[in-house]
Image (cartoon, rainbow, N blue to C red):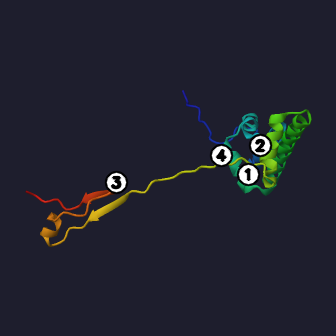
Amino acid sequence: MDEIKKRSGRPKGSPNKPSIIKEKNKKLILQSLDENMGILAPALKVGGISRLTFNHYYNTDVDFKIQVDEIREKGMDYVESQLLKQIKDGGAAQTIFFLKTKCRDRGYIERTDTNMTIEAIKIKYIVPTDDEKKLDEPTTPLNNNEIKLNLHEKKV
């Protein structure tokens, strides 16, 4: 039997130019991104492309990037409007959140004051000299805040 030769490349009937496929993918992603309020993961799932491909489109196509940014801004505006609705309905937590994030310049900011004190420890070094007798002489007594380190040990 003769073996069937498989041809590599796109299947029969597919567009000749990959740019047509890219443009269709971009339109599908933009539509899905708009439906998902700018959230990327579900839009990529619907579009069937990877995040790497999306990042390539985003970084190389200026028009695509502008459209994606507009869709993301639209999603943030929607969420912000929902927050304002909840504030108007008397939501205390939403009001506090808004003040902490949007009114920081008016003093609505949380700060954590940390007061740390460290007691310093004085370390007295005895530097070895050529005159061994000086090391054998008693030194002045140490007070409680000093630690004596002898860097030169005598071998007996």
Q: Alpha-carbon neighbours of circle 1 within 10 Å: few (<14), some, or many (≥20)? A: some
Q: Position of residue 152 (x, y in %)?
A: 19, 62
Q: Alpha-carbon neighbours of circle 2 within 10 Å: few (<14), some, or many (≥20)? A: some
Task: Answer with left or right where residue 39 lies relative to residue 141.
Answer: right
Spatial separation of the CA atoms under disc 4 and disc 3: 64 Å
Q: Position of residue 140 (x, y in %)?
A: 25, 63
Identify the residue shown where x is 78% and y is 57%. 62
Q: Position of residue 84 (x, y in %)?
A: 89, 40
Spatial separation of the CA atoms under disc 2 and disc 1: 12 Å
Give the numbered dot on residue 52: 4
Spatial separation of the CA atoms under disc 2 and disc 3: 75 Å
Q: Of label 3 and label 1, which has the lower sequence position?
A: 1
**Residue 36, can we see it?**
no
- Residue type at mark 2 is Asn
Residue hosting label 3: 144
Q: Of label 1 and label 4, which has the lower sequence position?
A: 4
Which label lies toward us, 2 or 1?
Answer: 1
Task: Answer with left or right where residue 11 lies relative to residue 117.
Answer: right
Q: Camera-side residue: 6 or 32?
A: 32
Give the numbered dot on residue 58: 1
Residue hosting label 2: 25
Q: Is the Cβ of the residue at disc 2 closer than 8 Å to that at disc 1? A: no
- Please state, as top left, top right, bottom left or bottom right, where the N terminus lies in the image: top right
Spatial separation of the CA atoms under disc 4 and disc 2: 13 Å
Which label lies toward us, 4 or 3?
Answer: 3
Spatial separation of the CA atoms under disc 1 and disc 4: 10 Å
**Residue 2, can we see it?**
yes
- Residue type at mark 3 is Asn
Q: Of label 2 and label 3, which has the lower sequence position?
A: 2
